[in-house]
Amino acid sequence: MISSPIEEIKEKLDVMQVVGEYIKLQKAGANYRALCPFHQEKNPSFFVSPSRQMWHCFGGCGEGGDIFKFVMKIEGIEFGDALRLLAQKAGVELKALDPAVARMQSERKGMAELMEWCAKFFERQLADSQAGKEAAQYLLDRGVTKESMIKWRLGYAPDSALGLCEFLEGKGYSRDEVGRAGMLAYSEGKTYDRFRSRIMFPVADLHGSIIGFGGRIFTKAGTAVKEGFAKYINTPNTALYDKSKVLYGLDKAKMQVLKNDACILVEGYMDTIMVSQAGNENVVAVSGTALTPWHLKILKRYTENLLLSFDMDIAGDTATRRGIDLALQDGFSLKVITMPEKDPAEVIQENPETWKKFLEGAVSILDFYFSTAFSRHDAKSPEGKKAIAKDLLPIIGKIANKIEQAHWIQKLSHEIGVREEVIQEELKKVKGGVESYGGRQDVVQGTVAPASRKQLLEDRTLALLFRRPENLTLIAEEHLSLFSVKTQEILAGFEKNPSLGFQGFEGLFSSETIEFLKYIALKSEIEEEDADWEKECRVCLEQLHSLFIKEKLDSIAKEIQDAEERKDAVKLGELLLQFQEMSRKIIL
């Protein structure tokens, strides 16, 4: 009997169906395999088990789990978002306990449907209206292909006071609903469509649902732009859209960001489209704002390597500089794509190969700041040294990793001819420098701790038992002390269920242990067929025995050191004899 929405979702969705929507799977015996989407690799080490409804990477990252873990990892979302996404896919209703939450979800759903109608309206205007066709030709002249216009769902907002609003009213939406979605503007007691005479860029959430728009002014040839019309405007914050939390194009770029372990950050909609069109699909743009903590939190789910194509200003406390400081403090690795006085879209329009050269020549953010500072000041004069330090020390103080920070302190010391100790003292005075840094310790996020040699041998032994259950007879009573308590409990359970069938495990092990055993069973299935399983099992037991002896020797060695310090000759003699006898038991 299904007792929860989670179990119902798992009952209705197959792991092959879910994983197969993101990566191409190939048959491998009873399982399927692919190149892991979570790390770079040349040989497929990512396996999916239909029988156990699980996946696991046996390569560099060691990630694994069920459909929820996969969606959370590949979409870069929390469990609640994965639950909602998979529930929708499975057709499972998630009952909201709080009426206020239910109302909010209903409002958001209705607004999302309204925004989809807006996108369709703008798309039709671009394709069919005379002004829209001129806008489309402008885009073609700027280098945007017809394929990209379709992919990015570009549109056109007509020069009409209420053209969109009346279209939406015809679909059953009230003017109040259109206003709450951010699609109306108000002036002198009158109501207008917010976007008029503009090329429209739909902004989507991570799942591709339209949540807002950016609009670039465009009028018919020979028609002047009306006074007061900004070149670009965006949807205001709504229940769906918050520009401080949205990255334009991430819905299309996220898989490529994961694959490349890097994200190109640009400032404009056109830049994003043209960079993606040029072959670098791991590109996103901030939506009319600088980098925010929410942007960085989202990006860190996919990569810690950012390539910036921004207007960079080393002097002053600009918004861009503040975003970069936040990224450095959060442990991101930043590089700068340096270009002449042109944006990426213009460079690509002229020659895509030139863009690729600029991209390949990206330099670390600190190298960029160093070269900029030294080009502006005389590194030989006292005033120049002071000015260079003033530019660079606040940046160096933001670096999260102490080793990396020490490198740049050393470089600055060498370049301006001032001792490192002096640089360190000045750094302490800088706001946001070492003293205000708070002593944060580096944490490696999103990685799996390497397994110990003993753990690997224990896992290998269990996998060999799944491969050949008859190998259980090789494990005698004296072998049990070689294993961890967890493995001892599993081996005891194996004795009660010698066929190693998973239905028989349900009454023997916790759900956590059963999930671990599913991983071990999958591991056993991807082994070569022609191996000598009995011999391998004996080798594992011998090596575990050697590790056990070495651990004992380490323990005795510490006691020997303690006896020497206490000058206890009798105890020292006993310990040396034990050490000698134990050493003979090591299997070489």
Image: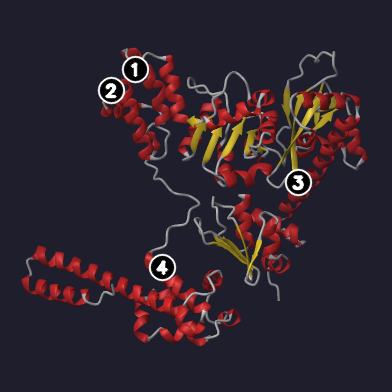
Real-space CA distance between mark 1 and mark 4, rounded to the nearest whole angstrom:
54 Å
Three-letter code for the amino acid on which mark 3 is drawn:
Arg
Which residue has dot 4 on it?
455
Type of the residue with mark 2: Val
- Residue lying at the far right of the rendered structure: 170
Residue identified by numbered label 3 = 108
Q: Which residue is at the front of the view, 83 or 485? A: 485
Q: What's the residue type where badge 1 is placed?
A: Lys
Residue type of the residue flagged with mark 4: Gln
Distance of label 2 from label 1 (alpha carbons): 9 Å
Q: CA distance from mark 3 to mark 2?
A: 59 Å
Q: Earlier in the sequence, mark 1 or mark 3?
A: 3
Q: Is residue 320 left or right of residue 130?
A: left
Sequence-earlier tag: 2 or 1 = 1
Residue depicted at 34% across the width and 17% down the height: 385
Viewer-side residue, 263 vs 182:
263
Q: Secondary structure at mark 4?
A: helix
Check disc 1 and report its element: helix, strand or loop: helix
Real-space CA distance between mark 1 and mark 3, rounded to the nearest whole angstrom: 56 Å
Mark closer to the observer (3, 2): 2
Q: Position of residue 514 (x, y in %)?
A: 55, 73
Residue 161 position in % (x across, y down) = 88, 25
Q: Are marks 1 and 3 in contact (CB under 8 Å)?
A: no
The mark that comes first in sequence, 3 or 2, is: 3
Residue indicated by mark 2: 418
The numbered dot on residue 385 is: 1
Residue 572 is left or right of residue 260, and the answer is left
| Image quarter (top left, top right, bottom left or bottom right) of the C terminus | bottom left
The earlier-in-sequence mark between 3 and 4 is 3
Q: Is residue 552 left or right of residue 141?
A: left
